[in-house]
């Protein structure tokens, strides 16, 4: 039940604000524990390269598709 003089939407807004602040504090503490961006890029690079290699080994990609995917991979890698 809402206190006298305080509309329900104001209480909901206040509760949402408190929850948001809690989430931001939690996210900020987790962000401090993340590896540097360069490490994330290396992990991404390794993972995607392995996936491309697996698709190539089981012949799911023809030569043209493999070339295009590899080109896009190197383009994304250089941007990272």
Image (spheres, rainbow, N blue to C red):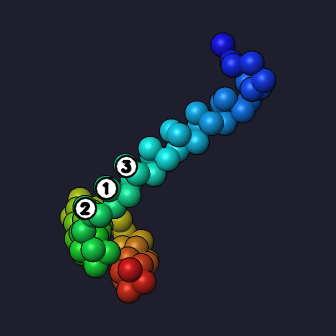
Dot 1, how many residues are within 10 Å of its Cα: few (below 14), some (14-19), or many (20+)? few
Height in image: 55 above or below 1?
A: below
| Quarter of the figure that contains the N terminus | top right
The C terminus lies in which quarter of the figure? bottom left
Residue sitting at 74 percent across and 18 percent down? 4
Inter-mark Cα distance, 2 to 1: 5 Å
The residues tagged by marks 3 and 1 sit, at their Cα atoms, a distance apart of: 6 Å
Q: Which residue is mark 2?
A: 33
Q: Which mark is residue 26?
A: 3
- Location of mark 1 (residue): 30
Q: Do residues under tags 2 and 1 come within 8 Å of each other at their CB atoms?
A: yes
Q: Residue 7's spot in the image, x, y percent? A: 77, 26
Q: Are marks 3 and 1 in contact (CB under 8 Å)?
A: yes
The quadrant where residue 62 appears: bottom left
- Residue drawn at (24%, 68%) of the image: 35
Q: Position of residue 18 (x, y in %)?
A: 53, 40
């Amino acid at each position: 039940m809402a206190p006298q003089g305080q509309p329900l939407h104001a209480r909901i807004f206040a509760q949402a604000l408190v929850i948001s602040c809690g989430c931001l504090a939690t996210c900020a503490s987790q962000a401090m524990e993340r590896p540097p961006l360069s490490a994330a890029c290396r992990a991404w690079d390794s993972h995607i390269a392995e996936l491309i290699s697996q698709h190539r080994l089981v012949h799911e990609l023809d030569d043209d598709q493999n070339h295009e995917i590899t080109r896009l991979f190197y383009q994304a890698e250089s941007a990272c």
